[in-house]
Image (cartoon, helix red, strand yellow):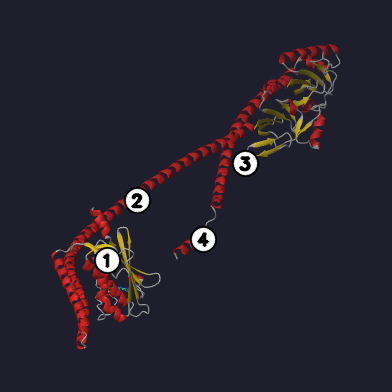
Amino acid sequence: MLGADDSGKNRASMTAKPPTALRLWPIAALCLAVLAGLGWGVHEQTRARAFAELHERGQNTLNLAESSLRGQLARFERLPGLLADERVIRSLLLSPRNSDLIMAANFYLRETAELLGASDLYVMYSDGETLAASNFDQPHSFVGGNFAFRPYFFDAMETGEGRFFALGTTSNKRGYYFGAPIDVAGQRRGVIVLKIDVDEIEQAWASEEVRILVTDPEQIIFLSNRPDWLFHSFGPLTPDQRDRTQATRRYANASLGVLDYRAAQDRHGFDLMFGPGNAVDASEYLVVQSAMPDAEWTVQVLLPTRAARGQAASAVGMALLGLGICALAGLVLWQRRRQLAVRLALQQAAKDDLERRVVERTQQLRSANAALRDEVSERRAAEAQLRQTQSELVQAGKLAALGQMSAALSHEFNQPLGAARNYAENAQVLLDRGRITEARGNIDRIIGMIDRMTRISRHLRNFARKPNQQLRAVALADSVIAAQELLDWRLAKQGVTLAVDMGPVPPIVIAGPVRLQQVLVNLISNAIDAVEECPDKRLELRATQSGASVRVTLRDHGPGVPDALQARIFDPFFSTKEVGKGLGLGLGLSISYNILRDFGGELMVRNHPDGGAEFTLVLQAADSLSAAAE
Ligand code: ADP
């Protein structure tokens, strides 16, 4: 029942619990998600901080660039107005074709331009024609050139102030133009223009890392600390923008490019720019810009974000590394704690086990002590019992010996008495019939038996006096004949024949002659009983000598002794014969057995292979004794 329950439980647990790998999946996924979230958070934080720093740097750069630009422009913006009041200039505009005045103005302008550090300085007539210029003696002289299309001219003529940035149509050099009207005698007669070189400004911005750009109102880059993006617009120009640029010939004959870029704003509000180009790995810039409304310019500082992003990535790496180290340290700590716990549990278990064993052992010792005490008292009781039994046995033994003796006596006397009675009865009959001789023979036999009984009683007397009667050499044949004589009447009565074979030399044995005869009578008498109801009534007595021992076998053709009884037939009082029939006391064989032992011999029984019992007496040959004596 228990086994069935267990297997059922196992099955249930197997179906309920998924395999370990499957159970670990959600945990692993959760850990990954947490790690990813953490990584993302750290990345965003660090990037935002790095971008903020970058932005601040950009802002500083922008401020510097803008102020240098403003400073440069501020330095020159008032000068054209002052120069317009100069007498030489005014005189020239009153007589524009006067070559002396033109020359004087040329020299004046050249000197003043050099003095001021201006790129060019020139005077335009009201129709836009250049009358005199500081570069009058240069190959690309402005003199004679008409720049009426330039805003610095018409703005100055109309509003009293003209400013413009452009690529020089004659000089092909970028410059900033300041125009101021020349009023003579209340009439606006022309414009004086001062052009400054912007190359110096750009040179002051030189930086390998940061891009500083200035764009015009059409989003075309005209100032840059790097030449590659110059004259490029952020995105293609609209037709309007193109028309406006064409009208003022701002970029003269220079070809305009388009910058392929993408602008974006990140989640923290930083302006970003990707480009040029649409490639995935296109450079990314953080954009900081500011407008200069009076010049309609926009100054932009572009800062590459690569380093900031790298910083964010390495922060993520560091964070993950830190986390990894912490996790590893935690794992090691946990492992050690677990090992400690396991060790403590093992120690506790060992201690518990020891205590339990001590308790068990103590219990065992206690019960062993109790058992020992019980055993001691049992032993004592047993000893007392033994003593009691021993004394009882001694008593019983005495009684048994007495009984055995009485039985033996009655047995030994009953036989000759029975025979004597028969012979006496016969003698009476013979006397009645006058057969005196035969009667005498019977009486002689009776006398012989009485002699035998006398010998027995003497033997008993001797036995009483001296238990170990002297053994001597006895002719086996004499004992056999005497026994045969005693039993003759029974043999004859029951038709039993006794064949005797003493061998070539009748053996002489060591025995007491009466007791040997007694044994033979017992054995032959039993054999007669055994063959009583059998058809084959032959008895065979055979004696053989081999060396120092003589074997006498008596074989009958009766039923034999059952195997189960063979060990018991030598016990005193063992008998299978009915009470009243014959003697049936069960003492014959036991007495015979003891007599043989007294002779230093043996008495054995077996069933003959061809049927019938076979008793064997083993006796010592008298020769060996006399030989030993010699
Ligand atoms: P008893 O003759 O008074 O019975 P014994 O001691 O002489 O006592 O014999 C014991 C038993 O041995 C007999 O009762 C008989 O059963 C068995 N016995 C003895 N001799 C023979 C024999 N020759 N064949 C078969 N049984 C025998």
Find disc 4 in the rendering and name its residue: 11
In 3D space, how far apart are the residues under numbered discs 3 and 2 (Cα atoms)?
A: 67 Å
Q: Secondary structure at mark 3?
A: loop
Query: Where does the image place residue 515, in percent across and percent down from the top left?
Result: 22, 68
Q: Residue at x 34, y 80 (%)?
A: 533
Q: Nearer the viewer, residue 178 or 487?
A: 487
Per the rendering, the mark at residue 267 is: 3
Label 1 – label 2 distance at C-alpha: 82 Å
Which label's residue is closer to the chain start, 4 or 2?
A: 4
Residue 372, image x, y percentages:
23, 57
Please state if 68 lies on the left or on the right of 155 as rendered. left
Q: Is residue 367 visible?
A: no
Query: Given this view, does label 1 or label 4 mark the residue nearer the observer?
Result: 1
Is 535 or 61 nearer to us in this picture?
535
**Rendering quarter of residue 333:** top left
Q: What is the three-letter code of the residue carrying label 4?
A: Arg
How many neighbours does mark 4 have within 10 angstroms: few (below 14), some (14-19), or many (20 or more)? few
